[in-house]
Amino acid sequence: MTIKNSTFMMPINYKNILVTCLLCLFPLLGMAQQSYNMGGTVYDENGETLPGVSIFLKAQAMVGTATDANGVFKIKASKGDVLVFSYIGYENQEYLVDAENNKISVTMIPTATEMEEVVVTALGTQRKISVVGAITSLDAKDLQTPATSVANMLGGRVAGMITVLDSGEPGKNISEFWVRGIGTFGASSSALVLIDGLEGDINSIDPADIESFSILKDASATAVYGVRGANGVVLITTKRGQSGKLQIKARANYTLSYLSRMPEYLRAYDYAILANEARVVRNEEILYDNMELRLIKNHLDDDLYPDISWQDEIMKRNGFQQTYYVSAQGGGEAARYFISLGTSIEDAAYKVAPENTIRSGVGYNTYNYRINLDIDLTKGTTLYFGTDGFMSLRTQPGFANTDAMWEAQSMLTPITVPIRYSTGELPAYSSSFGGGGVSPYVLLNYTGKQTNQQYTGKATLALSHDFSYLIKDLKLRMQGAYDNLSWKDETRYVMPELYLASGRTTWGELQRAKSYDAVSPQYSNYQRQSRKYHFESTLSWDKLIADDHRASALVYYYMSDQQDTRDADIADAGRRALEALPKRYQGISSRVTYGFKNTYMVDFNFGYTGSENFEPGKQFGFFPSLALGWIPTSYQWVMDHVGWLSYLKIRGSYGSVGSDRIANFRFPFMTIIGENQSVGWGSTLNGVSELQFGANNLMWEKALKANLGIEGNLLDDRLTFVVDFFNDKRENIFQRRETIPGYAGLVYSARPYGNVGSMRSYGTDGNISYTHEIRKDWSFTIRGNYTYSANEIINWEEPPTRYPYQPLNGYPHQATRGYIATGLFADEDDIANSAVQSFGGFKVMPGDIKYKDVNGDGVINTDDRVFLSDPTYPRLMYGFGGEMKYKDFTLGILFKGTGKTDFYHVGYNSAYGVNGPGYVPFNNGKIGNVLTVVKDPSSRWVPMEYALANGIDPALAENPNARFPRLSYGYNANNSQLSTFWKGDSRYLRLQEVTLNYNLRASFLKRFGLSSADIQLVGNNLYVWDKVKDWDPEQGFRNGRAYPIPSRYTLQLYLNF
Amino acid sequence: MDALIRYHRDIRCSFTLTFKNKKRMKNIFKHTIVCACVAVMTMSSCNFLDVADNFEESFKYDSIFVNKTNLERYVWNIASMFPDEGYKFDKLGSFASDEAFSIMISDYTSLDFIQGNITPTNLRSFNIWSSMYIIVRKVNTVLGNIDKATDLTGREKNELMGYLYFMRAYAYYRLIMYYGPIVILGDDVMETNETEDYYDRTRATFDESVDYVCSELERSAALMPDVVTPSYFGRPSAGSALGLSARLRLIQASPLWNGGSAARRTYGTWKRSIDGVNYVSQTYDERKWAVAAEVCKQIIDMDIFALHTVKKMPDTAPLPDNVSQQNFPLGAGDIDPFRSYSDMFTGESPFARNPEYLWAQRSSGLVNYSRHAFPYEIYNGYATVSVPQKVIDAYRMADGRTIENSSDQYPYLTDGIWNNGTDLTFSGYTLKGNVHKMYVNRELRFYASIGFSGAHWPMLSTSNLSKRNVQFWYNLNGNAGKNSNRNLPYNVNTTGYSLKKFVHPEDSWGAPGQGEGYENSRRLEKAYPIIRYAEILLAYVEALNNLSSTHTIQNRQISRDIDEMRYYFNMIRFRAGLPGVTEAELASQETMQDLIERERMVELLHENARFWDVRRWGKYEITEREPVQGLDMDADGLAFYNVVPVNQTVARNRVVDKKLILVPIELNEIRKSPSMDQNPGYQY
């Protein structure tokens, strides 16, 4: 029932329209001579009664009625009349009156909205067949499984996405993701995420609110975003109201998460025995004499020689999450709405001690709502109002950094301190790592509480109007939005008095000294605000001409303004006023498409967009792109002769996109002057000086993207596939100028930037799916996807290096560099005949790691460090799985995996510091925990002499392939270098998800007002095949110093009212 | 606030259309298109993206040069980028030479240098290359824009230009003193974002470098005032510029840099790689001495500067018989030699009016430096400045004889404690009667400079009477000895001699851990003489002494004029209360050179002369090879006074290598510019 094909295409007169509408609603008295009393009930496709269906006589549209709340109607009609049943969203049904009947049963059939599939693209939708850019769309229903965030659902599910999840802790368990991997070493490599056209946080949205989910990967798809599109774009649209019956959906789930894989550490006695070995084999005195060993073995002194499994003391292995969600969708002809409300309550698997009265455990709760309203103001004019909010509340111990607990858990030995001295005092060991020598038990239970709250609220108002009366199919849409984010962190920090025992008096009394003064409760808070204005307007037009020519054009204009208090907070005092200035974008972009007979397609896109980050006059960049598509299966000849191939499309695109977030600070073109600078030589003035030297000729980072895609359907569309190949060249990457010599007189720390870097990234992604219907109610689908992305630095500016293997050029970005280990030194002769290794003055012994003298100068030093392997994030990510439907049961399985990704157990420097502790035995001496695997003599290099003297099987001694070198007690500078010796392989295949869904349609549900219910059992992260074993492969380099990624078991209930 | 208002205005002009529309629903169709067009136009007219304009109330780059005040704010900020020369541990100078010793290697870069640990990749505080060129760039930036300041009068502009030339020259001067040959940029301000070859420059030769900097110094001297008003104390004057020029010219004329055998031996093969030119001249040119002498003479002829003297007082020590009793400068009859020398270092003499300073500055670094003379425990010093025995032995006896050749009247005895019974006091100084005989009968500068074992430390500012008028003893169990501070074994004197030169009788430091003001302890403010007249006189005499013929420099006849040499050399001697030189000594060039060298070591002790002196004389490898000696710190009683080599790793590990004449340039600097050469001896 659209107005388009009505006869109202006349000079517009609102009164007429209004009157007509009103008339439609009220039945007029008919003039029929012989009238029957007709009546009955109208049902929807599910057999539900349908209220509000209008019924009128086909010949006399003025005569009509509507169904009541129970779907019942009554109307008078004459024989031969045709009753028309009309309802928005449904096809009209007709009933020919030939006799009186008040038990007519009419079932309405929903309109097949548009038979052609559409894809959400930049600035609108496109018919799927016309799309020539590289776009992956994800069916929103694939996102309806329980997960902690949307980002966590992407890896393995979406071709073109690379994700890494490195913590399983609630509130931190949010994957990092990149579209087609990392393509730049510039300041920002993350994708632009747009929710209903506005930049947003992918994790603040409930998956059930998502209507469509697309990833724009190539230049053709992203060019309209111009200066922001270089790293790919994720487009999410949310559900909107639809006129028709009210639909209520409710969801509840209950998840049990279980830390299935935890590192195992030695207990006290084994630890002590090995500690003695570590000392003896380095010609040092033993640490525990026989008497002490007996005390340890028999647990005779729990104060001085305790035996604590810290893991058991702070972990309970299980965590729970429950989420609730309800949405309502409906509306009439004039207005439509979608509203939703959701919440998630999740706690972590920390074991809060009973005496911890403030319950300072770790938890993460979220609350979200969304209201989308569409109001038809007049014919062709629609007002859209949307608002949504997201609030999260994270609770942590007052110490706040739970990483410190994991550090303590993995590093603190069982024997260092007890949980609590028998005298009642809590312990602290004097050193400063993790929580500063505080046991994880104290950190968790006695340091107070911190809460982190985040609130996001967005309101948007859009007006769209159809200008068909001027130019057919010309539409204008204008939208304004306001987005507000705020954060509030509150800390209530407290610390008890802590003691360290040193021994016993001759009377056996425990001697202890205070090592930490008590800290009385301290309150502090931190607040941050961010807000954003956005305005955009889109003028679009598309037309099908003479059935063969399909053309469209679109002009998009936008401007946005964003401010964040943090920008000023983190800047130097002298830069704050500058950093606090709003970030602004402005741009106009356009897309022109033309298609001929669904066979040849051309898209031309451009963005002319600007950012405030550049010099006035140089703010705008022009980013064009061109894409071509060809569908050979549209030829009649192909249709006739290649029947098995129902659809094939070959498409290619080339174009440029930009990135303006080129530096970690703003306005690099500007020379910035600081006031209140010092003066010298007797002057009393207030000095001024440059804080930053502006760089000449700056511009945005530019990505030249080429993409070639092939997609097709085979076997009656049962098998579909898409494969894309891409080659991106990033140019003008912003980099601090490294080759400007000192005599240019620029302050090194403030030296200017230049657009000097360049980098290439290339790869392929694709997906395939096969659906087979075995019987009417028995079908299955199998699916697979992959993303492979590699990169190479073409130009990283640096001063010439000493050896040809030292420059970064020609190697992947973030490649790992270190020493090549050639094994363990066999004996003293081996050491004498090898290059000199004296890291930190450390004297090497047989069983220590031997490195390759790459430059052959007889000394091992930093010049021998070479490229070792690709970066530690995966280059290949894939997923496969499928669904099987049998009657009302659906079983879904998803595997995800990554390709070979090397990591290093020791020496790798990351945001968490240099790794090694927790993995290398006795790395920190008295606070160097030891993995149980070390107990096996063949896992470590045991000197033959020691083996013989201590009853270790000589066959296991001096194992040249040992996993650990000769033990040493304390930091061993030689063995702690990053080298191939410590290389691990973190590739994995994960049974990511198994879903069993039962769709319940029993009639008894109706009694509860339900039309259907789905009961789901979902398991996440059920099993991992990998080589890391001791902990999760995605956390390989963390060496057990991170909250593991739990297995999750969920019971989920969906109710449709 | 203003920025906020502007910002809202911008937003309004872009959003108005949305709201206006609502009021005019009736005409919505026609107006929508118009509005859309207006919207686009409005945005561009608003300069929506020019947010940095909102920043206009703050200081912009261009506004530096628009008026005199801003210009001066920028210029005097440049001055603050020069280091405080009074703080010596992190610079080339005393601790990198044989006039000072410490075992605090981790803290003192100078010590690290002498251990050979300073490499192109580990320069620690010696990486002044870039920081000095920052000054050059800033000066050039001002020079290129100075005409924009319209309210600057011609006179003001000239004076400011003088200071600017001086700053640039002083930055180059520091580079030459550290690295030797420099890259001369002229008035260039390099672009900030250009290709590699744009930035490639070569180093000038040593002579070109010195000639350029000296001519720049002389140019600045012509523009700067001759006298600094006391309120601007610290600012250079014409004399400062000429003084630095004289110092550079003397270095340039000296054997290492002037084609002497030292130059050939050390730098014979050091050639610029792009054209094969020797960085250091390989042919001797006597004229360079004459040029140096001429600059010194210019300074003398300015008639502004004079040696600092204090009139004779009742407690002035009597002069030995062989010292002229005439009035200064022909004798020392009317002056107090001890005070004349000492008061200009301790802060006693009002330094803003001291005629001896060609350039001096208030120096908190010097005050800090002097703290290191005090023992750690109880007296709250740092005790890391030790003076080697070599320096002690360089001081003459009161009658001007050397210790090896002392007279019966003023004998140099090493056989035990003096046991004088009563203390000897003169010029406010107390020589206690119970000190070792080595420290008796010495020239006055010795007492003014050296804190030997048993020396008297008044520390008068402290209210703690037990801490006033104390003798510090450096023997094993003495109150300043090795055992006095077992907790911090690096904070202990290691030769038995500390430096008293910059310590005023009032100065004291309170108690450890109690803060500096504890017990009312305080220090006098001190000025560090970057260059003083005595050095110019010694330089003049040395330059003249090296001439064998007459040279005409700037219309001035310069030759080895015995009268000039006697007059100015004796001036230094008389001020110290010592006899003048003999005619026989004057007659011999070699003898005079020896006398001058010894005089410089004593007179300019710890004033950044010795490090460069031994190098320019070509003697660095000889003087540095001599072991660092001191008293036996591990002994008490008379055994303590045995002179022994300092038994410390830091002393044993001292490296003597030609490469240590200069500091290396940072490795990356060499790699960035293909035409840049490293200093000899440094590989990576």
Image: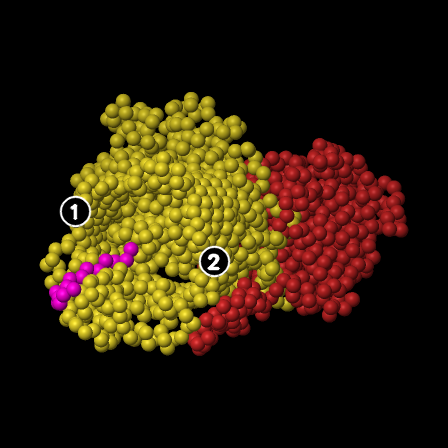
Q: Is residue A918 visible?
A: no
Specify start and end residues of the magenta stretch as a single range: A98-112
Residue in view at x 50 percent, y 45 percent: A654
Residue linked to disc 2:
A554
For this view, does A36 lie left or right of residue A550?
left
Q: Which amino acid is tagged 1?
A: Lys
Residue in view at x 55 percent, y 67 percent: B41
State whether discs 1 and 2 lie on one chain.
Answer: yes
Which hue is chain A drawn in?
Answer: yellow
Q: Is residue B399 above or below residue A237?
A: above
Residue in view at x 43 percent, y 44 percent: A599
For this view, does B670 lie left or right of residue A386?
right
Rendered location of residue B189, percent (x, y)? 68, 53
Give the CA distance from mark 1 to mark 2. Answer: 45 Å
Residue linked to disc 1:
A887
Residue nearer the viewer, A866 or A166:
A166
Main SS, magenta region, reads loop
For this view, does B644 lie left or right of residue A870?
right
- Which corner quadrant of the image does residue A893 belong to? top left
Q: Which mark is residue B192?
A: none
Rendered location of residue A740, percent (x, y)? 61, 46
Residue nearer the viewer, A290 or B647:
A290
Residue nearer the viewer, A591 or A525:
A591
Residue in view at x 18 percent, y 57 percent: A46
Whether residue B307 appears in magenta in the rendering, the answer is no
- At numbered mark 1, what does the secondary structure look like: helix, strand or loop? loop
Whether residue A108 appears in magenta in the rendering, the answer is yes
Which hue is chain B drawn in?
Answer: red
Quarter of the figure that contains the C terminus of chain A: bottom left
Rendered location of residue B214, percent (x, y)? 76, 50
